[in-house]
Amino acid sequence: MSTKKYGLLGHPLGHSFSRSFHTERFARLGIDAVYENFDLGTLDRFPALIQNEPMLSGLNVTIPYKQQVMSYLDELSPMAERIGAVNVIKVEHLSDDEALQSATHLRGVRLTGYNSDIVGFKQSLQPLLEDAEKRPERALILGTGGASKAIRAGLEDFGIHPTFVSRMAHPKQGILSYEDLTPEIMKRNLLIVNCTPLGMFPNVETCPAIPYELLTPGHICFDIVYNPCETLFMKKAAAQGAVVKCGQEMLEGQAIESYRLWTE
């Protein structure tokens, strides 16, 4: 049996732990597979990547391609379609006969998109909701990129009403700007999820511009950034007594789910 190849698609990838996590897991479980980083400065190079990697069986997708890559895919899972973003791609190389009978975007390859971010997020958030003195009814999602779409769906599954917060000066209707975060809004939204890359290595001295002084011990502040595992966002929230959690557990949960999707 040939060694399977998997990898991470995104740019830049210097912050990522995915390669080391999967490589260690493959070795520990005796899985005959390798995991590589595919740092593409432009998604125009994606078709060539797929065509030039005949052993590639699956990809994870990270910033900034979780939405852009969807135009190259032949099929989306119901969950990925609902979320509107993909972080897992199953790569199936077709035989010559199958290729002739299949109308795929890239000749000889069928690409299916999934989203495992929602699985990792829900698994990681669940204990915080169970331990909270008052279960949050509303949440603020900082950022509007591909990861934030999975977070929104996960919160909705918990029955929590999410509102996006954008750094845009004039965000779309239904989306708040950071300047809109009044004491009343902060009091109503007891869960805040950072889906921006602010605070991620190497830019560890940055953080979202929320009014941290309005946070309380009743707030939960979840950062999907996992490198470092204590971001400035978390430090400033913890200083106000808020419950904080980084994205390491979410990363591991979505990675394990990714492998299940690649091999099911």
Image (spheres, rainbow, N blue to C red):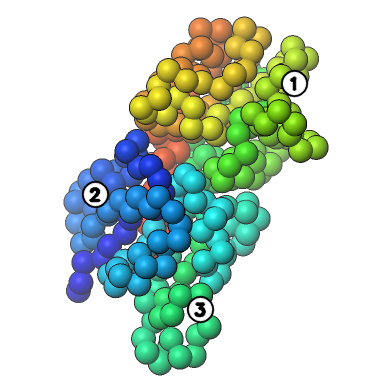
Along the viewing direction, whichever of 112 and 28 lies nearer the viewer: 112
Along the viewing direction, whichever of 28 and 200 lies nearer the viewer: 200
Along the viewing direction, whichever of 190 and 45 lies nearer the viewer: 45
Residue type for callout 2: Thr
Task: Give the structural element (helix, strand or loop) at label 1.
Answer: helix
Residue type for callout 3: Thr
Say if mark 1 contacts mark 3, CB within 8 Å: no
Q: Is residue 12 left or right of residue 132?
A: left
Residue in the picture at 35% in, 72% down: 51
Residue in the picture at 74% in, 12% down: 183
Say if mark 2 contacts mark 1, CB within 8 Å: no
Residue 93 in view of the camera: yes
Residue type for callout 1: Asp
Q: Nearer the viewer, mark 2 or mark 1?
A: 1
Task: Give the structural element (helix, strand or loop) at label 2.
Answer: helix
Q: Is residue 29 left or right of residue 65?
A: left
Q: Residues within 10 Å of mark 3 (few under 14, many from 20)?
A: some
**Which residue does the numbered mark 3 point to in the structure image?**
104
**Which residue does the numbered mark 1 point to in the structure image?**
180
> What's the CA distance linking mark 2 and mark 1?
44 Å
> How many badges with numbers are in the image?
3
